[in-house]
Amino acid sequence: MVTVFRSTLRPDAVEDYEVVSTRMVALARSLPGFVDYKTFTAGDGERVTIVTFASWDEHDAWRRHPEHRAAQRLGRERFYDSFAIQVCTGVRETRFRR
């Protein structure tokens, strides 16, 4: 299960956001089924975070975790100008490594 989280932060929220974000990454990493986490920031300030869990149930446990729910509320109230979330299942995966 892959979650793609696109967001734009409010300029006055960056410092507080970083504290909460660091905690959320640590929490996600500690949960069963966590696979990986990556975040990128585009030139226009949009942030894209990709979080992968091994199964829907493990992803859903993350989504419903009380501390994560509290962080989601903070995001809507204080951190984000906008966000969009896409939850996807893998249809096919191909890897290459030299």
Image (cartoon, rainbow, N blue to C red):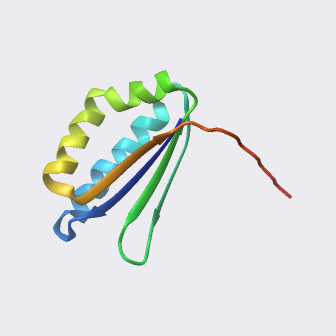
- Which residue is at a point 34% across and 52% down the rendered structure image? 84
Nearer to me, 85 or 32: 85
| Quarter location, residue 82 | bottom left
Residue found at the far top of this picture: 57
Left or right? Give the position of 52 relative to 65.
right
Quarter of the figure that contains the N terminus = top right
Question: Which quadrant would residue 66 be assigned to in this image?
Answer: top left
Residue in the picture at 44% in, 36% down: 28
Instruction: Judge whether 14 appears above or below 34 on screen.
Output: below
Q: In which quarter of the image is the C terminus?
A: bottom right
| Location of residue 70 in the rendering, given as x and y in whole percent from the top left corner | 21, 36
- Picture coordinates of residue 19 (x, y %)? 29, 53
Residue at screen point 76% across, 47% down: 94
Left or right of 11: which side holds 68? right
Q: Relative to 24, does residue 83 appear above or below in the rendering?
A: below
Q: Where is residue 90 in the image (x, y as percent from the top left)?
A: 61, 38
From the viewer's perspective, is 40 left or right of 81?
right
Residue 15 placement (x, y as % from top left): 24, 63
The number of numbered discs placed on residues in the rendered structure image is 0
Q: Residue furthest bottom?
A: 43
Residue nearest the observer in this picture, 74 or 46: 46
Residue found at the far front of this picture: 91
Look at the picture and state if 7 lies above or below 32.
Answer: below
- Residue visible at 24% across and 42% down in the picture: 72
